[in-house]
Image (cartoon, grey):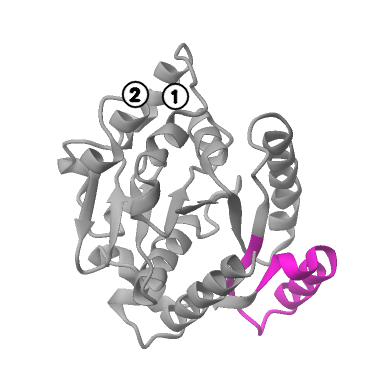
Amino acid sequence: MARVFCIANQKGGVGKTTTTVNLAAGLARVGRRVLVVDLDPQGNATMGSGIDKRTLELSVYDVLLENATIAEARQRNDKVGYDVVGANRELAGAEVELVDLERRDRRLKGALATANDQYDFVLIDCPPSLSMLTLNGLCSAHGVIVPMQCEYFALEGLSDLVNTIKQVHANLNPDLKIIGLLRVMFDPRITLQQQVSEQLKTHFGNKVFDTVIPRNVRLAEAPSYGLPGVIFDPSSKGAQAFVAFAQEMVGRIDSM
């Protein structure tokens, strides 16, 4: 049975897509079957997995409107080792079209149920807003992985996200919980980042992953080559950190 996780944060530019594609590549590297669902109309997780969003015949847009199944819409790039249900600009229109449809917040959950036995992990890359797309992701998931920078404004956004997750848990998806907070783009030389990191550990305890993703140029370069950093430069510190994170995730899920 697949474990479904949203990678979500209502603050933009915190590394959600970088986390999604590199965790997927890391999980594939340790022998897990992985599906990435790109729920962001920008399609960055699609492009970052080596799939051209401009040439998609079927995308997550078709899945949400029930015009295609996961099996029909998914694509595979053997270089990265995982499957992708891609997204492009069409997806922005889904927001409006879903409003009048039945089960509008559970469309993705129904679609993923048909592929439940084909994957160990499903990772959903959510847009940086609480939209109908994000709601579909949260209603489908067993848990949320929150990538965040150790900065003051990130703490402000985190409290909003926690409240959102509590509301979805109470009203729509009782299985939903925060799996963990992942510290990304971390620079130990910056005192503020160290202080915020300690605050996180004080407030959230074991909900903070042990793995820390450092600020790393190779991770930033990788998307321009259509690859996750884990594949682009496996020897880089960022790639090694994401493989360690994948191993920590597997251990955490196995013990749940």
Q: Please tell me which residue is depicted at 48% across the width and 33% down the height of the picture.
A: 133
| Residue that mark 2 sits on | 65
Q: Is residue 115 left or right of residue 243?
A: left
Q: Which circle marks residue 95 in the picture?
A: 1
Question: Which stretch is magenta?
Answer: 180-209
Is residue 191 shown left or right of residue 39? right
Residue 220 falls in image quadrant? bottom left
- Image quarter where the C terminus lies is bottom right
Q: Nearer the viewer, mark 2 or mark 1?
A: 2
Residue lying furthest bottom: 235
Report the front residue among 151 and 198: 198
Q: Is residue 238 above or below residue 88?
A: below
Q: Is residue 184 magenta?
A: yes
Q: Residue at x 19, y 42 (%)?
A: 54
Q: Secondary structure at mark 1?
A: helix
Q: Residues within 10 Å of mark 2 (few under 14, many from 20)?
A: some
- The residue most toward the top is 100
Answer few, some or many: residues within 10 Å of disc 1's Cα (few below 14, many 20 plus, some between 14 and 19).
some
Q: Are marks 2 and 1 in contact (CB under 8 Å)?
A: no
